[in-house]
Image (tube, grey):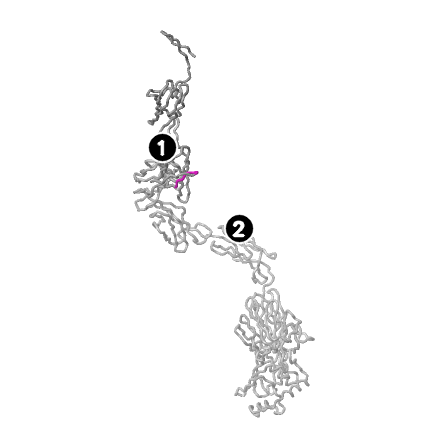
């Protein structure tokens, strides 16, 4: 800190000489009456001032700010660091919380700055500039320090001299009239009245006893529950900006100051703003001081604003928890007094009580049991016991969750003390309307939807407590007795609202009533022979409800096929054959019929069909590619035809193809088609046999043979394509004579018996051929000698 106080006489004289400025003396002389000058001009000491203003009424306002030339000092003292010396902080924290308190000390040496001894002080203030305001409104106090301080700490006024009470809180450390200054979050400055201290410092300076003025700045924020935490910071004389530094503002008039009286002017009390438990006591101390700051032995009277008591010696005995004010006043004048707050906290607990006791709650209430200790004076304060309950559950804060109606017990134990009470739980208000569920009613019929009233835990309570009921729904009606009459078929939501706020809801399924007509829904298409055809029936009742309803199987008939019932109750018709068929129902005296066309079913297999099982060479055959369903019903497909292995393919014609085979043997015919993205292939192997006989021929035409020889005629037939036809049965004639049996019997071998020209004709299936040949005599087979007149044959 720049400019530590130098209170030696030589130092002060040197300072006075250094601060004499003729111009200021002339200014003062020109503005004051001559008879007010108590000291010759040449003896006046110049006073360094930041600003001096003539108020025009014989008074001057002087603002004194540290100009770094000496005479100013400030410091921070803290309870949490009691030995710390901090005189260089640019910001001075003022604060209080449960762990620490920080106070500010501000000093001004009037002799060092050369303050006038011939000016009377009307009033003086210490102006502090706030850097960080408090978060809520607090009271700030400035008390003069009776003890000079240099490099102070919480414990020490100087490094060698302690405070009588730590924190400069003793009656010999600080005091003076208590004039609180309210500071709010919007405040920017604090103005503390230091008039008494300034006058005492001036008087001491005039007496040559030193002109040091010290002010301790602290604060308080109190309520019925205790002292609250607060904090703010102000700028110190170390601030780099002069206008932010502490400023001493003094209003003076140019007359010699009056001598200060030693008669009682105020009372100091210690301890100040303290705390005490209700079951203890404390001895208070007081000190009467005169206007000149001197201590007086004048007698005082003690009093309490609050519930406690204090005797004539200052022994204070609290009673009720809260904030008391302890006051000391001069016996000769009640106007000379002082008061200090005393926060009374609970004493040691001697008993425990639970609140509320033996109370009744509804299930709608939040149940909290509060445990309190009582000290010896009956002061109640919160306890945090161990809880136990006969039913339900309770948390550490005493919130008890109960769900069973009746009377239940809660016990609390803490610090060797215990207490218990009963709680009775009764029904709550109507929280919900429970309506009947899973309802079904036929159109035109009635069903009850009257609700039950329950509280939030489901306990039944009289329905009348819910108020009047109103129902809303999209179909049907509900009468005053809660009976619902169904109208339109469907599932409907019924909402019920009570005038006191409870609600309920249910759904009811309205089914179709007695029918006046039945209608089978036509599939509107050609159905497949292998499909199950759903046949829903529309049931229309007298209220116009048209609903699909299942009809029992016994009510169904059809010209073909059968019926079955699906899992959802719909009847399916199972046709078999292709054609048009009538399907009918007869139920509850009502009938209805429809006609359905049945077509082939889905493709199970594909085949090639023809009129011939075996093909004849040269004969045209008509082929069709057929789709066959699972019931064997067929329909024609448009196929692409080919011969497997090559050959002339069948030619498309009409709804199929024609094919004329030319070679006897086997032929594989194939047809392909695509339907619904699926490729189908049909293949069939045919045997091709010769065609119709168009010509016959046999061997031997034009030959000459002997009767010893035989001729294999080897007859053969040919069809139109030149394919040989074997196995023909020929009828034979030789020279017009029927030789069929002879030649057939010899396996178509001719054996001549006579010589000469021979013509053989063979005929089979209307086709004939003939050959001509010549037969000569063969080798002799016998010798015949014919004597004259007879004969004799000699076989050779």
Q: Residue at x 37, y 18 (%)?
A: 754
Residue 700 at x, y percent in the picture: 39, 25
Q: Is the C-beta separation of discs 2 and 1 under 8 Å?
A: no
Q: Name the residue carrying label 1.
A: 720
Q: Quadrant of residue 734?
A: top left
Q: Residue furthest top?
A: 789
User: Which stretch is magenta?
Assistant: 640-645
Above or below: residue 426 compared with residue 263: above
Residue for badge 2: 391
Q: Is residue 266 left or right of residue 751?
A: right
Residue 604 visible in this rendered orientation of the protein:
no
| Residue 701 position within the rendered picture, expressed as x and y whole percent measured from the top left | 37, 25
* Number of disc labels: 2
Residue 633 at x, y percent in the picture: 37, 36
What element does badge 2 sit on?
A: loop
Comparing 705 with 477, the one in front is 705
Query: Does residue 651 appear to the left or right of 370 in the view shown?
Result: left
| Element marked by disc 1 | loop
Q: Of the residues under marks 2 and 1, which one precedes in the sequence?
A: 2
């Amino acid at each position: 800190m720049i400019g530590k106080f130098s209170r030696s006489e030589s130092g002060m004289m040197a300072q006075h000489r250094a601060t004499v400025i003729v111009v200021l003396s002339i200014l003062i002389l020109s503005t004051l009456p001559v008879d007010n000058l108590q000291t010759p001009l040449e003896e006046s000491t110049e006073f360094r001032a930041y600003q001096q203003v003539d108020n025009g009424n014989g008074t001057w306002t002087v603002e004194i700010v540290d100009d770094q030339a000496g005479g100013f000092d400030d410091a921070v003292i803290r309870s949490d660091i009691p030995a710390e010396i901090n005189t260089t902080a640019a910001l001075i924290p003022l604060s209080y919380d449960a762990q620490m308190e920080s106070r500010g000390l501000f000093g001004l040496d009037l002799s060092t700055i050369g303050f006038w001894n011939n000016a009377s002080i009307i009033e003086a203030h210490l102006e502090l500039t706030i850097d960080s305001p408090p978060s809520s409104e607090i009271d700030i106090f400035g008390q003069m320090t009776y003890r000079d301080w240099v490099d102070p700490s919480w414990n020490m006024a100087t490094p060698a001299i302690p405070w009588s009470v730590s924190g400069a809180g003793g009656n010999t450390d600080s005091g003076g009239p208590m004039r609180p200054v309210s500071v709010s979050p919007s405040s920017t400055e604090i103005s503390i009245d230091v008039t008494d201290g300034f006058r005492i410092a001036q008087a001491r300076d005039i007496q040559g006893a030193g002109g040091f003025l010290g002010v301790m700045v602290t604060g308080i924020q109190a309520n019925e529950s205790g002292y609250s935490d607060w904090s703010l910071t102000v700028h110190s004389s170390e601030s780099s900006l002069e206008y932010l530094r502490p400023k001493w503002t003094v209003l003076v008039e140019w007359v010699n100051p009056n001598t200060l009286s030693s008669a009682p002017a105020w009372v100091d009390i210690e301890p100040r703003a303290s705390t005490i438990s209700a079951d203890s006591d404390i001895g208070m101390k007081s000190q009467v001081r005169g206007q000149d700051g001197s201590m007086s032995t004048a007698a005082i009277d003690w009093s309490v604003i609050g519930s406690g008591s204090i005797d004539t010696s200052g022994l204070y005995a609290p009673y009720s928890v809260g904030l008391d004010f302890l006051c000391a006043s001069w016996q000769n004048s009640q106007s000379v007094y002082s008061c200090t707050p005393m926060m009374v906290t609970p004493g040691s607990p001697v008993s425990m009580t639970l609140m509320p006791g033996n109370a009744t709650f509804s299930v709608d209430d939040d149940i909290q049991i509060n445990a309190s200790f009582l000290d010896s004076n009956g002061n109640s304060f919160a306890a945090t016991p161990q809880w136990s309950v006969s039913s339900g559950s309770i948390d550490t804060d005493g919130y008890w969750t109960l769900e069973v109606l009746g009377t239940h017990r809660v016990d609390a134990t803490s610090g060797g003390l215990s207490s218990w009470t009963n709680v009775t739980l009764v029904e709550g208000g109507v929280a919900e309307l429970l309506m009947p569920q899973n309802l079904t009613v036929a159109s035109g019929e009635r069903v009850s939807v009257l609700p039950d009233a329950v509280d939030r835990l489901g306990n039944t309570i009289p329905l009348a407590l819910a108020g009047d009921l109103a129902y809303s729904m999209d179909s049907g009606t509900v009468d005053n007795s809660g009976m619902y009459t169904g109208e339109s078929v469907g599932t409907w939501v019924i909402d019920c609202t009570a005038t006191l706020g409870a609600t309920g809801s249910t759904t009811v399924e309205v089914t179709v009533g007695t029918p006046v007509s039945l209608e089978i829904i036509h599939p509107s298409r050609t159905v497949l022979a292998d499909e199950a055809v759903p046949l829903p029936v529309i049931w229309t009742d007298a209220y116009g409800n048209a609903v699909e309803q299942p009809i029992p199987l016994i009510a169904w008939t059809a010209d073909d096929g059968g019926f079955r019932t699906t899992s959802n109750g719909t009847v399916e018709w199972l046709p078999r054959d292709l054609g048009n068929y009538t399907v009918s129902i007869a139920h509850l005296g009502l009938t209805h019929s429809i006609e359905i066309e049945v077509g082939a079913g889905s493709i199970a297999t594909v085949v090639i069909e023809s009129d011939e099982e075996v093909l004849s060479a040269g004969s045209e055959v008509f082929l069709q590619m057929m789709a066959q369903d699972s019931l064997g019903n067929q329909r024609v497909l448009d196929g692409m035809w080919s011969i497997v292995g090559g050959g002339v393919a069948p030619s498309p014609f009409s709804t199929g193809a024609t094919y004329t085979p030319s070679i006897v043997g086997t032929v594989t015919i194939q047809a392909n088609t695509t339907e619904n993205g699926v490729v189908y292939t049909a293949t069939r192997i045919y045997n091709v046999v010769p065609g119709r006989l168009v010509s016959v021929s046999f061997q031997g035409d034009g030959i000459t043979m002997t009767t010893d020889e035989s001729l294999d005629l080897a007859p053969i037939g040919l069809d139109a394509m030149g394919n040989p036809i074997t196995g023909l049965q020929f009828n034979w004639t030789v020279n017009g004579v029927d030789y069929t049996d002879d030649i057939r019997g010899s396996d178509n071998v001719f054996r001549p018996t006579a010589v000469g020209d021979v013509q053989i004709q063979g005929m089979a299936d209307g086709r004939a051929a003939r050959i001509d040949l010549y037969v000569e005599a063969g080798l002799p087979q016998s010798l015949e000698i014919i004597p004259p007149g007879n004969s004799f044959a000699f076989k050779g």
